[in-house]
Amino acid sequence: MKKLNVALIGTGFMGKAHSIATAVVPILFGAPIEIERKVIVDIDEELARNAAHQYGFAEYATDWRDVISRPDIDIVDICTPNDTHAPIAIAAAKAGKHVMCEKPMAMTVADAEAMLAAARETGVVTMVSYNYRHTPALQMAKRLIDEGRIGDILTFRGHYLQDWGADPSKPLSWRFNKAQAGSGTLGDIGTHVIDAARLLVGEFASVNAIVKTFIPERPLPAGRFFGPSGAASSEMGKVDVDDAALTMIKFTNGVYGTIEVTRNAWGHHNQLGFEIHGTRGSIAFDYQRLNELRVAFADDPADAFGFRTIYSGPNQPFGDKLWPVAGMGQGYIDIKSIEWYNFLKAIADNTSAAPNFADGLQIERIAEAILASGENGNWVNIEQSAA
């Protein structure tokens, strides 16, 4: 078995999560490819050095360009702010490296198209890190849908609600800056729901959206700031991205749906969820209760009819690789580990991973259409991929 060396670009929260996942995946799954966490990169040398020690990387560096050109690097893992995804991914793909890229894939559709073209040119395996789709309960929902257990899908209602952006004293991090993030809540968390909807229901045909910014300015950060917490200065800066988006959807298969996403919903910490109604039943999921899938089937007996709960365990997808008893509980790192297992298995089998850069491009088209509809108030059609 060949050992593949990983270069992780970015030492923030997602860099930490990916580091834990790559350490855990061989233990949980007996990874199909042996990997070594070879080098971690950050423009701040002290952060890079400390992360190498804490996250278990053999080396550290401060320039991603030097790292991806190295012949001993096989996988490039991109965990940086959105504005750097395209240049790193394109250079890595052209250098023949497999690429794991945090979401959203790119700042624009044009960037995503260039990333996909570079990957197809060299044939490398790509994955966009929409990790929630790998949750066993969500995969169980897909199984039930594919088996026809809820009949033909009629409607989809999705949401992703967070509250860390509701406080106007939160500093103006890069996530509130269009030049670095591309968009706000839509790109940050809304694309996760779009990915889930595409996986479970199908392709988007057109959208009609309301896109709003509720807090027009925030305190500038005091020092480096990458996440939803941190110190603020007394100077204010403009917020030029969306705080919320409410979208109506027409799917290509005739299903109708809605998606609500906001970072300004007090009391909702990280609530990605959906409810799907079909001709023979319904499915409901809430990531804050990620070990539970709620189902109701039309053929249940009348005296016991209603929603009931399926608890994630060995009978659900990937459950046999995690913990042996339903209800023992799976967590965020378990999901990230499944994501990395799927990526490594695609490399080992020389097949396409999912979601890959083609999926990421389609999600960017949908997100761009939502923003356009938010501007003009009209239904906007989604360009469909040639495949």
Image: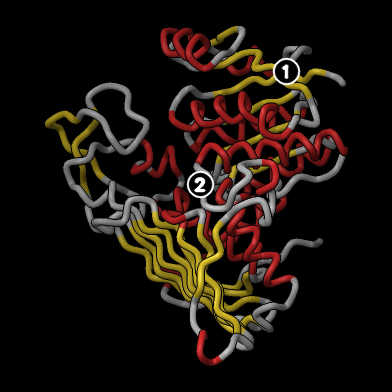
Q: Is residue 29 visible?
A: yes
The image quarter in which residue 180 lies: top left
Q: Residue at x 42, y 59 (%)?
A: 160
Q: Position of residue 255 (x, y in %)?
A: 61, 81
Report the coloring of the rendering.
secondary structure
Number of numbered labels in the structure image: 2
Which residue is nearer to you in this view: 304 or 43? 304
Q: Residue at x 67, y 66 (%)?
A: 383
**Tag 2 near tag 1, CB within 8 Å:** no
Which of the image's four quarters has the C terminus?
A: bottom right
200 relative to 229, above or below: below
Using a 10 Å C-alpha cutoff, classify the residue at mark 1 as few (fewer than 14 neighbours), some (14 to 19) or many (20 or more). Answer: some
* For residue 83, side relative to residue 100 (left or right): left
Rendered image: mark on residue 5: 1
Which of the image's four quarters has the N terminus?
A: top right
* For residue 51, side relative to residue 68 (left or right): left
Q: Position of residue 58 (x, y in %)?
A: 61, 8
Using a 10 Å C-alpha cutoff, classify the residue at mark 2 as few (fewer than 14 neighbours), some (14 to 19) or many (20 or more). Answer: some
Q: Is residue 375 visible?
A: no
Label 2: which residue? 329
* For residue 134, side relative to residue 228 (left or right): right
Instruction: Identify which amino acid the numbered label 2 is placed on.
Output: Gly
Q: Position of residue 202 (x, y in %)?
A: 67, 70
Instruction: Identify which amino acid the numbered label 1 is placed on.
Output: Asn
Secondary structure of residue under mark 1: strand
Which is more N-terminal, label 1 or label 2?
Answer: 1
Q: Give me the C-alpha separation between circle 2 and circle 1.
A: 31 Å
Q: Position of residue 5 (x, y in %)?
A: 72, 18
